[in-house]
Amino acid sequence: MGGCGIGMDHDAAWIALLHVSGSSFPTGGFAHSFGLETYVSDARVSSGHDLLNYVQTMLCCSLGTLDAPCVALAYKYSGEELSRLDQLLTAYRPAVELRRANQRMGRAFLRAFREMYPGTELDAYQGTLAETSGGNYAVIFGKACAIMGIAREFAVSGFLFNSLNNLIQAGIKLIPLGPSEGHAILFSLYEAVAATAQRALRMNEEELGSFVPALDIASMKHERLYTRLYMS
């Protein structure tokens, strides 16, 4: 695996992707609903069908058009180019909670990754974060996957699967739903995830964007909910 940074073979890289995109990897994703808690509180999401619609909207209009393409771009970027992409992603998020959630997850991912694989390019990147508005999860994830030698298309698909799974798990707790219904929702999204990943791989910086104003408003309202289970 020339240039991957840590010399993993194909099988080890595949196992590594399962590890870093799994729900047990310490990113703190379980603490964030990314606006979903507001939708449930306002009774706009109250069933499995509603949750599926919410997740599909996130996939097509935000995760698939902003975060996933940033994973694909970060995979190829280094140094100042990586930092610029990171700060650009921050600038795309108008809601404070969404910005903080993505940065907290990204920086938590980075800490865990550096403990596992010291001496990579991300060691130096850690030192720049105190002076920037970076540390976004998508950017750190994409670069880490490149270092581990995980195929770029698998990195994007793994990111999307992890992100949707976190949202669905939040929905299971908040609505609430049974685990089987959550599993069925995730299973129904396989083809959409694959298609979204392929589009994200073809996008460039000029095509990045997210248009979910209702989600931005829900995230802003979340700070003032009477009771909250989630940080975002």
Image (cartoon, rainbow, N blue to C red):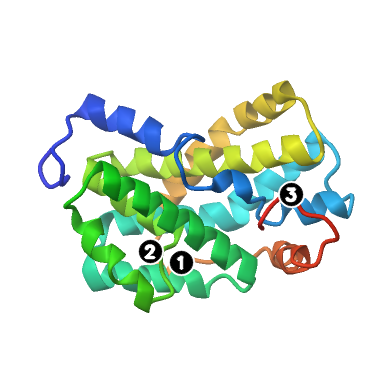
**Of callouts 2 and 3, the N-terminal one:** 2
In the image: residue 212, left or right of residue 157: right
What is the secondary structure assignment of the residue under circle 2? loop
Quadrant where the N terminus sits is top left
Q: Which label belongs to residue 207?
A: 1
What is the secondary structure assignment of the residue under circle 3? loop
Binning the other alpha carbons within 10 Å of mark 3 as few (below 14), some (14 to 19) or many (20 upward) gives few
In the image: residue 89, left or right of residue 3: right
Q: What residue is disc 3 on? A: 229
In percent of width and height, residue 120 lies at 18, 53
Binning the other alpha carbons within 10 Å of mark 1 as few (below 14), some (14 to 19) or many (20 upward) gives few
The residue nearer to you, when weighing 194 against 51, is 51
Instruction: Give the quarter of the image for residue 76.
Output: bottom left
Q: What residue is disc 2 on? A: 204
Q: Distance between the residues labelled 2 and 3?
A: 36 Å
Q: Which amino acid does label 1 sit on?
A: Glu
In percent of width and height, residue 186 lies at 62, 31
Looking at the image, the residue that sits furthest to the right is 43
